[in-house]
Amino acid sequence: MTTTTSETPQTKTKPQLIVAVLCFGALAAALMQTLVLPIQIKLPQLLHSDASNTSWVVTATLLGGAVAMPVSGRLGDIIGKQRVLLGSSVILVVGSVVCALSSSVWPMIGGRFLQGVAMGFIPVAISMVREVVPPHMASTAIATLSATMGVGGAIGMPLSAWIAQDYNWHTLFWASAVLAALMVVLTAVFVPHVADNHPASIDTVGAIGLAIGLVAVLVGVSKGNDWGWASTNTLLCIVGGLVVLLLWGVYELRQKDPLVDLRTTARRPVLLTNLAAVLIGFGMMAQSIVVPQLLEMPSATGYGLGQSILEAGLWMAPGGLMMMLLAPVSSRLMTTIGAKSTLATGAAVIGVGYLIALFLMNAPWQLLVASCVSCAGVGIGYAAMPTLILENVPPAESGSGVGINTVMRSVGTTVAGAVMASLLTSRTITLAPGTAAIPSQDAFQLCFLVGAVAAFAGGAIALTISGRRREQPATVVEDLALTEG
């Protein structure tokens, strides 16, 4: 099929180069998820504060991403995606420099929030693919871009562990500032501004309401283990956030140009895809939390593997590469068996990875195998989700739709963090009188079992998604061309 100007922008830039730039930007933004995890335990000392305050250095990035993803997606639909990508890149530069110059907790939290806001780059980049590549490349490009969200989180930990171990910890943020500056240049030079803007207004009230509701719920979930699940703060955040989201939903249904078209989101394929995203996001993050702890557990326990932070990160790194390597496989599966079956396959593979870890956790290489299997499933599943969304939302809402789906993945990762923390503290042992309690072997096995159940449940939900069984990637792009042409 001959590519027409209605399918790809009028630009001399090769589609392969555009996709490469988008992947680089998405990967750099996703790295922010795990950038500070290797130094998290040292943050109270480094920032001259207590652990309760410094824990927000991690949480702030999650909150920034949750706020930015649906808003940036909608902005991309209205004013053009290249402009939003460029703005997200600039925000990442600013946030990284603020962190690099900070030696106290509150400026650091502000900088980390901005780094999270920059993750709005990811859903906009995914939704832009079908506008800048020829039909035969669309499926593989979307699959590769989708995988970068997991890849960035996976390789961020060993990379940041190496930098933090051999250099000053501020170097982490100077390095991210350099990556972000490169994002700005590459996006400005190689990513075209496609005339894809749609006449609409910015739903400011809707954006604020969604931000308040999401932040409140996510804070309650992420801090519930520290504050206590029955504490006033936890209940106020979770219940209050849910009430705000309910009121926000009522408001959105009455708007002509809502931030999120809830009627579209409530369509069965979109709704079920987003529910599956929560469970698969849970599956992705659970192993990222549990496996490193088991690797670093003292060998004196009889089940700990006694690895350093850097060694643990290196054992986890191949999993991130598996996500990227599986992108072409996922693309092929979507072409042959359809996106929903591909999503279910990815979820099943994640579950198998957890079952491997449940029975093989006695050596680092065994956990490496389990992690690679789970990450392969994440790569397959993450690639299929945006395809399902793009098949079932109007072109004018593609960015917003992918943004909400990305938020649902983040909700899954947040819930995973809270659940895994609760499970690991529910069954503990002490190595010697007066020493701190540490998770028992049973606690780790329970975490792996829960991860497997969540993944298989996500696969079961995926199988109930209705729609076209053998959606060709060209069809999505051709539909867009017909709609806009």
Image (cartoon, rainbow, N blue to C red):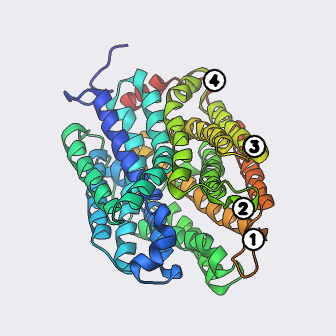
Which residue is labeled 1 in the image? 431
The C terminus is located in which quarter?
Answer: top left
Neighbor class of circle 1 (other Cα within 10 Å; few <14, some 14-19, many 20+) is few
Separation (CA) of disc 4 from disc 2 = 48 Å
Are dots 1 and 2 in contact, CB under 8 Å? yes
In x, y percent, where is residue 126? 42, 41
Which residue is labeled 3 in the image? 360
For the residue pair 157 and 151, the one nearer the viewer reads as: 157
Neighbor class of circle 4 (other Cα within 10 Å; few <14, some 14-19, many 20+) is few
Please name the residue shown 77% across and 61% down the image: 443
Which residue is labeled 2 in the image? 300
Asked whether the viewer can see residue 465, the reply is: no
Of callouts 1 and 4, the N-terminal one: 4
Separation (CA) of disc 1 from disc 4 = 51 Å
In x, y percent, where is residue 214? 53, 67
For the residue pair 362 and 450, the one nearer the viewer reads as: 362
Secondary element at tag 3: loop
Neighbor class of circle 2 (other Cα within 10 Å; few <14, some 14-19, many 20+) is few
Of callouts 4 and 2, the N-terminal one: 2
Q: Is residue 320 shown left or right of residue 178? A: right
Of callouts 1 and 2, the N-terminal one: 2
- Mark 3 vs mark 4: in front: 3
Which residue is labeled 4 in the image? 337
Please name the residue shown 52% across and 79% down the image: 51
- Residue type at mark 4 is Ile
